[in-house]
Structure formats: C-alpha cells, structure tokens
Amino acid sequence: CWYDCSNFSSIFIISAIIVLMSIMTARTLLLLNTILYLRLVCVRMNFADAAMASSNSSRSRGSTRRSFFLKSSAAVVLASSPQPASANGKSRTSGYAVQHTEREWAYMLSGAQYNVLRNGGTERPYSSILEGEERDGVYHCAGCDTPLFESSAKFHSGTGWPSFASGLSGVEVENVNPLQAGFVGAELRCRSCGGHLGDVFLDGKLFVNTPAFSSGKRFCIDGAALVFKPIDGSDQVVFGDISPPKVKTELPDFLSPPKITPRS
C-alpha cells in the first residue's frame, strides 16, 4: 500500500473538524471551548489529587471534586441554555408596536400574566384551563390581543402546557443556531408587544397522528400568555391564567369507608 492508513485517517478526521468549525456559529464554538477547558482542568485536578493523596483525606478530596463538578456543570448549562431577553440584549419593549411602561403592564395584567409575558416566567404544568381547551377558535395575546395560534394547530402533547404545531404571523421566533434550537429550543414572543409566550422545539415528529408530526415543531406555550376566543358564536372569552376545574375522583367500592347509619 503506497499510503499509511493511520495517517490517512488522521488527515480525514482533521479535515472533518475544520469543515465543522467553519459552519459552526460563535455561540457553538464558545460552548465547545468551555467543555474542552473544563475537561482539561478536570484532568489537571486529578493529577493534583494524586500528588496530594498522602496529605489530604479522601473526604476532603471528595468535597473538592463535588464543588468543582457543581461549578463546572453550572458553567456549561449557562453557556448552552437560552437566556432571558434582558440577558441576550433584546428588550421586551423597544422595537415593538405596543408600548407601555412596566407600571402600566403591572396594572393591566394579572400576576400570572405579568410573570410570563413581561418577566419571561414559566407556569406550572396543567395550571392553565387552556391546556384542555378543544373548541374551534383563535388564541390571542393576553397583553395586546394579537392573534397568535389557531385551534386547528393545537394538540395534546402530554407536557402540561398548551401545545401547537405552528403559529400565526403574530408569533416571533428567536433567531438561534440549529444546535440550540434542537436541544434547548428557541424563545417565542408576541410580535406586537414583545411579551414572552414560551418556546418552540424541533421534536414534532415524536407526536404521531398530530399536526406537529407534519410541521416537525412543537410550540410549547404558557397558558397565562393567551386568551381564547371561540368561533361558535358565543361571546365567552377564556383567559389562560385561570386554573382548570378540579375533577372530583371517587374511590372504588373496596377502598371506600363503610357507611355508618346513625341511631335514631
């Protein structure tokens, strides 16, 4: 053979790495550099632990490693996870058509609506009445009444939050790289007021026999950010910050306490 297989494999691997680095974004490279740096530091700490084994107890070494592991894990999570709007530099007010001061927003919205729309909070799963809503209609923004989702795109994902396969033009999707969009999703906002709605994930193919299977996306929305307006002719408007009614469950007969007949 006129060439060395090992050298050829090394050249192929290096070429593949160069091609991948050329198509990665700066955020992805920052994440990879962080992971490689932490791996290098961990290796160095292992050598340091071995050298100090004669003077340090195993308990103190375990404590040091646990502390380093927690700090390094937090650094990786912060580098890879989506940040709030105030952290990524984009305001929720400037550049949007609907403008209000934070004091006005706090007066206009309920506590749950303000926490989601203006603070970017996340509600508890199954805490919104809209998760179980199945009527035909349109879901609007609770802050500015912009149409966001149609009922035909809604499906039950089992996550506890209202889920949709697609959004209307009033939904603004955060511009992120494909790696982040695939693993941690992208933030969704109202295009008119900048209110936080939820996140979109690229796992729609997991939900067979739903609209998400066709779109390949799952719009995971906080119900408190929505107001549902049915098209059945009724004027009833459903606010998503309302909790669903509690279902009274009855015990089976063999678990029910015995009935006691009072003396007459």
Image (cartoon, rainbow, N blue to C red):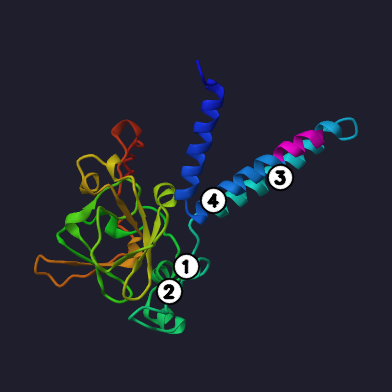
Secondary structure under tag 2 reads loop
Residue plotted at (52% across, 26% down) = 8
> Who is closer to the viewer here, 18 or 160?
18
Q: Would you say the residues marked 1 and 4 are in contact, meaning their CB atoms lie under 8 Å apart?
A: no
Taken as a whole, is the magenta stretch helix, strand or loop?
helix
Mark 1 / mark 4, whichever is N-terminal: 4
Q: In the rendering, which numbered label is found on residue 92?
A: 2
Residue type, label 2: Arg
Real-space Cα separation, disc 3 to disc 1, in angstroms: 29 Å
Mark 3 / mark 1, whichever is N-terminal: 3
Visible residue check, residue 134: no
Residue plotted at (71% across, 45% down) = 68
For mark 2, does the 10 Å Cα neighbourhood hold few (<14), some (14 to 19), or many (20 or more) residues?
Answer: many
> Who is closer to the viewer here, 32 or 224?
32
Visible residue check, residue 146: yes
Which of the 4 image quarters holds residue 106? bottom left
Which residue is identified by label 4? Answer: 29
Real-space Cα separation, disc 4 to disc 2, in angstroms: 28 Å
Front label number (4 vs 2): 4
Mark 1 / mark 2, whichever is N-terminal: 1
Which residue is identified by label 1? Answer: 85
Q: In the rendering, which numbered label is found on residue 68?
A: 3
Mark 2 / mark 3, whichever is N-terminal: 3
Q: Would you say the residues marked 1 and 2 are in contact, meaning their CB atoms lie under 8 Å apart?
A: yes
Q: How many marks?
A: 4
User: What is the span of residues highlighted in magenta in the rendered image?
Assistant: 42-49
Q: Position of residue 96 (x, y in %)?
A: 36, 78
Secondary structure under tag 4 reads helix
Real-space Cα separation, disc 3 to disc 4, in angstroms: 23 Å
Q: Position of residue 247 (x, y in %)?
A: 29, 50
Secondary structure under tag 1 reads loop
Residue type, label 4: Leu
